[in-house]
Amino acid sequence: MSETPRKPAEAHGGLLKRLERRLESALFRHRGATVAVFALLTLWLGWAALGLRPDASFEKMIPVHHPAIANYLTHEDNLRGLSNVVRVVVENRKGDIFDPAFQEVLRKVNDEVFYIPGVDRAGMRSLWTPNVMWGEVTAEGFEAGPVIPDGYDGSPRAIDQLRSNVFRSGEVGTLVANDLRSALVLVPLMERDPDTGQRLDYGRFATDLEEKIRARYENEGVSIRIVGFAKVIGELIDGALPILGYFLLTLVLTAALLLWYSRCLRSTLTTLACCLIAVVWQLGIVRLMGYGLDPYSILVPFLTFAIGISHAVQNINTTANAVLDGADKVEAAKRSFRTLFVAGTVALLCDAVGFATLLVIRIGVIQELAISASIGVAVIIFSKMFLLPVLMSWTGVSPAAVSHARRRRAHLPWLWQQVARCAQPRPAVVVTLAAAALLALGHWGARDLQIGDLDPGAPELRTDSRYNRDAAYLVEHYATSTDVFVVMAETPPQGCRDYQVLAGMDLLAAELERIPGVQRTVSMSDFAYRVLAANNEGNLKWHAISRNKYALGGAFQKTPKEYIGNGCAMTPFVVYLNDHKAATLSALMGTVRDFAARHDSDKVRFTLVGGNAGIEAATNEVIRDADHTMLMLVYAIVALLLLIEFRSLRVTLCIVLPLYITSVLGEAIMAWMGLGVKVATLPVIALGVGIGVDYGIYIYNRLQSYLDRGHPLAEAYLLTVSTTGRAVAFTGLTLAVGVLTWIGSAIKFQADMGLLLTFMFLWNMVGALVLLPALARLLLPATKPAAIAPIPQHAEH
């Protein structure tokens, strides 16, 4: 038996129709009260929204449930300077670091950074901190001292002593550049103030670095370079400040397009007001829930506004056609509400589902984005479904809008006639085959899509940004990069001095240093080699790990404390990388896990604990695991909502298949653009599906209404194209224009999201207009073929 799609009202036993009638009666009987309630809520939530502040956190960027991150948080006190750190590089443009004037600048920078709130002062390291030591073995025994000599006064003798100390310290390549022209201050940060418990204000911290360090000490002779997570967040916040300008640009462009489409100033202004109210509500509710404006979710208000506009276009279209058919303002508004309530509500619920599925990714910043965006869609349901029809019952549409609707009804341009032909048998087959070819092309192009970053530095920023230039300088001039991967050797108390433990570290170093992208490794075993040889007059025969526990005890005493955990029960094994590209991190994670499986014992266990690169590797694994889960979940829930509304698997396929093709093509575009799937780009996929389904719902809802009146499919789709189809096309263009303005952002990931969403919105629109009717022709029960007839001038719309 063939499956026959049913109207939503029939499918739900009249429940939605009864709800629709009751809401319609209440809204239009109490129009003044409705507007008053909306006005009061807007004032309250607008006042709350004024308290929004930029909000960023290191903890929100990491998956705290991942085993490696859990280990990192457990051992955080023993990993100072290896994860959330800032490096301040001071470069002498006119010479090397052994210059009294340069050393004075370096001292002042060190002291200035020391007092910036949020700095973990005990973990700071530079030539001017007392925890940076030199050491050597002499005829009298082992000698050591601070790199800056006691009584340093900048004299030639003091400078000569400093030079000797620097070379004996082993810090060349670490705290001192390989070319000796710059030195850095290593600044570990505290996520929370130990006294107040307040989270570190990254925006304020980044501003302090700029104002107190770079602006004060950079001049013709000295360059200041600053890298680290906190500085990236500062750059993102600074780049987000002009976002208001982009929002105003979007507002102006959208208003112009809406006025051109409707030919009605009053309905354009009414629609803009309702969508702005939705944005105010969204921001206010987010603030009341205790969230701020994270750099990764600061574009959500754009989406809220664009989605509101796209749905409101259907109201304007339906109201104008109702007035053309003779209805007054109130009756036209009621018809608009009646026609769009079910389809619009289901479409917006699908939008919300697209956002809400991001909650399965247990990374704070993505979950906050999901919550913020879901709130935005929820308030659109109220402003668009309830407030807009009530306001339109007073404003109505202008005579120019009615005349424009009459001209559109009387004449269908050639392009739209060709679009309508997609519902005929032969064009339907051609369109479906073309879609299948695009799907195959998309799968082929998406095969190179990777998880994680594909570029060095901070891919969220432009390649030529100040930050990425600073990061490139460090990679070029220092032996230890800013990308640090940490493995922890866990032992019983005092067990880290055991020969088996150090030998295991030695073997691990040999395996990791064969991986492309690994610069070097540093662990307690390296210091054991160095100290044991030094204690024996530098004889290379002693450059080995001794089995003698007393000899190892001597090496242990000379090992820097940051490489020995509390009680000698946890020893960091540090891996410095050229970059944090996805392939490098994946290879490291796999190698460490394989090594641990082969070498873990009662004496030592090798576990992943982080470092900034290790944290990113763990984040990549979480995203890899959640990527397909999220996509399947969003499609499953959207399909379920469509089945509930239309009670037809065939109709559901007609609406969902174009979305799937767009998703696959979107992944191919990401691979072609060199974008990996990561925190900044993953939400795009869910957004594209959730918002794109709106087109198909509106198209099929109107198509079904004509089919129910007895029109053959081809004629029904011609009528659909002449009304809802045009509105859907305008909707797609409006959404695309709304996000296309993002490409001007100084923040690269925002520009990339703008391009990807523009592509997905346009292709979803094309799929709904072209592929949906073709699939309907092939999948829905056969009807008697009918020639495309001209649109009846007084056909019901």
Image (cartoon, rainbow, N blue to C red):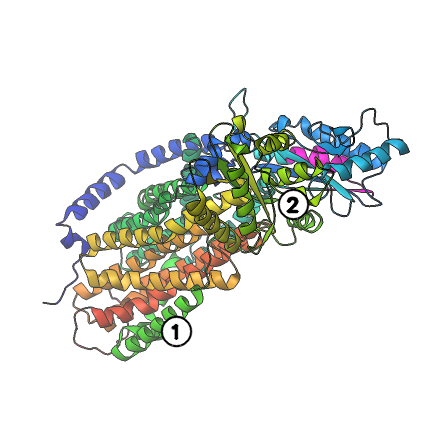
Q: Position of residue 222 (x, y in %)?
A: 79, 41
Image height check: is 736 above or below 39? below
> Does residue 275 show up magenta in the picture?
no
Pick whichever, 324 or 504, lies toward us: 504
- Label 1 Cα crowd, 10 Å radius (few <14 / some 14-19 / many 20+): few
For residue 781, side relative to residue 494 (left or right): left
Depicted 655 relative to depicted 462: above or below: below
Marks 2 and 1 close (CB-CB < 8 Å): no
CA–CA distance in space, label 2 to label 1:
61 Å
**Residue 415 got which mark?**
1
Please report the residue visible at 43 percent of the width from the left and 61 percent of the height from the top. 666
Q: Is residue 335 left or right of residue 181?
A: left
Q: Amino acid at mark 1?
A: Leu
Front disc: 2 or 1: 2
Query: Is residue 304 something that shows in the picture?
Result: no
Q: Residue furthest left?
A: 1
* Magenta residues (range): 207-224
Q: Name the residue rendered at 38%, 66% in the picture.
A: 766
- Is residue 720 at all visible to an observer of this figure? yes
Q: What residue did someone put label 2 on?
A: 480
Q: Is residue 212 magenta?
A: yes
Describe the element under mark 2 as helix, strand or loop: loop
Image side of residue 75 versus residue 418, left or right? right
Is 684 drawn above or below residue 233 in the view shown?
A: below
Q: Which residue is rendered at x = 27% and y = 36% of the image?
A: 30
Amino acid, disc 2: Thr
Please identify the quadrant where the C terminus is shown.
Answer: bottom left
What secondary structure characterizes most of the magenta part?
helix
Instruction: Identify which residue, 401 or 617, lies in the foreground.
Output: 617
Residue 394: x and y in percent read 34, 44
State the residue in front, 213 or 471: 471
